[in-house]
Image (cartoon, rainbow, N blue to C red):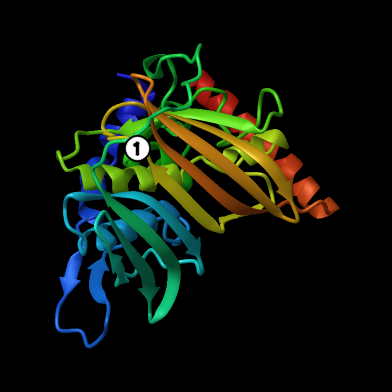
Amino acid sequence: MTEAEAGLQALPTQDPTSSLIEVLDLGELEGARTDEDIFIGPSQKQPHQRVFGGQVLAQSLIAGMRTVDPGRRVHSMHGYFLRAGDANKPITFGVQRLRDGRSFSARRVHAYQEGLPILSMIASFQDDDEGIEHQSLMPQGIPDPESLPSTADLLGKFDHPVARHWAYERPFDIRHIDPALYVSAKGKKEACNAVWMKTFGPMPDEPNLHRAALAYASDYTLLESILRKHGLSWITPGMSVASLDHAMWWHRPVRVDEWLLYVQESPSAQGARGLATGKIFNREGQHVASVAQEGMVRVPTDLKNKVVGAVQSAVLAHQIRKSERD
């Protein structure tokens, strides 16, 4: 048994995949005096007490799906993160039925906490149809996911709430192609990033659930293409990162309980904002989805944070050496 597996057995947490299915099982609020369809969803606990953006994206999609004919699949969505959500409180979702045409439906979804919107989204749904077809090619020479370390392998050794959450409580197994940016930024400073990802356990055979879950996972590592370009890790002292918006297009059927390759790049960063784009392929090389997100990235350059960073790096290096000896 590896050290990461031993740590996983020691943690009394709910199965991560079951937790994902549970959080996407919204309840409907009937009898509300409004022109919206109203749904209620739980929030997943987070170390920093802020709702994970991917969670509210996925739940908003589920709310919209509940108001559309089941034969119409979501093919695109555009959302704006308006406020930080409280991970200790439920979320209310209001769905406005904008249009139902012969082939397409459009829905506007607002996610609320305490009467204030935390996310605003418009999503479009389409009947299955036939037409011309082409796609981007999946990159070649990518190592198999089985040959790469998991997040638990990388972070399971650290006794820290964020490390434990990322290692054992997230519903997706994330495996970086290049060295992960969790605690350090190694390798070339290039504006690109790639990961393999899938849920830890099987998911129900419900296409809408898989599409919503893919939106959930698409928010995990996309901004890392920006960080990698500038040699930044997620624990860079004083750094502030937040998703501002999120757009996604589903091209082909997808299963999130099978390995997916998420290839990301950042074409530009400026004005404390960075743009990141991503392509998602299944293991057979089919281009199943595309993603775009702009994020706020603020990195202090003052002397105080530089000193704090040097101290934190030294402490972290000591912890890593100690864990490797143990």
Q: Position of residue 317 (x, y in %)?
A: 64, 30
Q: Nearer the viewer, residue 76 or 273?
A: 76
Numbered marks: total: 1
Residue 14 visible? The answer is no
Kindly tell me whether residue 308 is visible in this rendering.
yes
Q: Which residue is mark 1?
A: 172
Task: Say left or right for 98 vs 119.
Answer: left
Vertical arrangement, residue 49 with respect to residue 113, above or below: above
Query: Which residue is farthest bottom?
Result: 33
At a point 63% along the width and 47% down the height, the residue shown is 275
User: Percent from the top left, x then y, of residue 5?
Assistant: 31, 26
Bin the neighbour count of mark 1 within 10 Å (Cα to Cα): few under 14, some 14-19, many 20 and up: many
Helix, strand or loop at mark 1? strand
Q: Residue furthest right?
A: 303
In front of the other: 238 or 272: 272
Residue at x-position 20% and y-position 53%: 22
x then y, percent, for residue 169: 34, 43
Residue under the point 57% across and 56% down: 242
Q: Position of residue 224 (x, y in %)?
A: 58, 39
Name the amino acid type tagged 1: Phe
Q: Nearer the viewer, residue 208 or 14?
A: 208
Q: Quadrant of the N terminus?
A: top left
What's the residue at 33%, 19% (across, down)?
284
Taking the image as shown, residue 222 lies to the left or right of residue 167, namely right
- Residue lying at the far top in this picture: please name it: 141
